[in-house]
Image: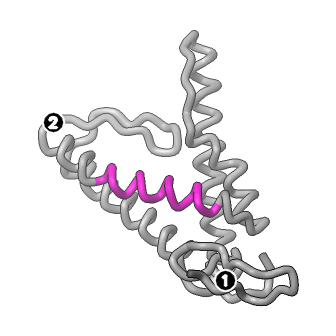
Amino acid sequence: MTPSFQGARTVKLVARLFLLEGIAAVVGMAVSLSQGHLLLDLTALGIPMSFGLVRGSRGWRTWALVNLWLGMLASPFLAITIAMEHEVYLSILGIPIQGLSPIVAYPVVAASFALALWQYRTLTREDVRAAFQVGAYGRAELRTPLNQPLQRM
């Protein structure tokens, strides 16, 4: 990825957020292990994902988009669970938050959804897709050995 493209700053911010989540997951796994429990948290992949996003890796961008989709899809289910419970137990960036009332938990879920949506929209913008060399519909552009566009059938 060339650092001069228009959305480089926002992609770096998205990458830093994934890095923060990854570090929090590693800390949470270490704390759990120190208490005698084994916890495997895939959020720890946010660390290499952040470096991959800054480097311009299409694979890590795809993995980031999958994670963001899963998070956005989980938000309505979390909201339904909050509606059915009297107290909510959440973990944000590896920090356990217990005993939240639904009045407080709903804005937290909404803010989490909004942040994931912003990250998703950032990674799918036209200039960002071009920087990651992703063509239309998320497909890499096919080229011949002479670097000419290849026609799809």
Look at discs 1 and 2 and give the one toward the viewer.
Answer: 1
Real-space Cα distance between discs 1 and 2? Answer: 45 Å
Which residue was labeled with disc 2?
A: 85
Q: Which colour scheme is used?
A: one colour
Camera-nearest residue between 28 and 49: 49
Quadrant position of residue 25? top right
Which residue was labeled with disc 1?
A: 130
Please name the residue shown 46% across and 72% down the image.
118
Q: Position of residue 124 (x, y in %)?
A: 53, 76
Quadrant position of residue 136? bottom right
Q: Position of residue 16 (x, y in %)?
A: 66, 60
Asked if the residue under mark 2 is in contact with the one under mark 1, i.e. CB atoms within 8 Å, the reply is no
Please name the residue shown 49% across and 69% down the image.
120
Asked if residue 81 lies in the magenta stretch, the reply is: no
Q: What residue type is labelled 1?
A: Ala
Q: Is residue 118 above or below residue 144?
A: above
Camera-nearest residue between 131 and 51: 131
Q: Where is residue 42 in the image (x, y as percent from the top left)?
A: 56, 38
Residue 71 vs residue 43: left or right?
A: left
Q: What residue type is labelled 2?
A: Glu
Q: Specify the principal SS of the magenta part.
A: helix
The residue furthest top is 36
If the image is split into quadrants, where does the C terminus sit? bottom right
Quadrant position of residue 73? bottom left
Q: What stretch is highlighted in magenta?
A: 61-75
Q: Earlier in the sequence, mark 1 or mark 2?
A: 2
Asked if residue 63 lies in the magenta stretch, the reply is: yes
Camera-nearest residue between 7 and 139: 139
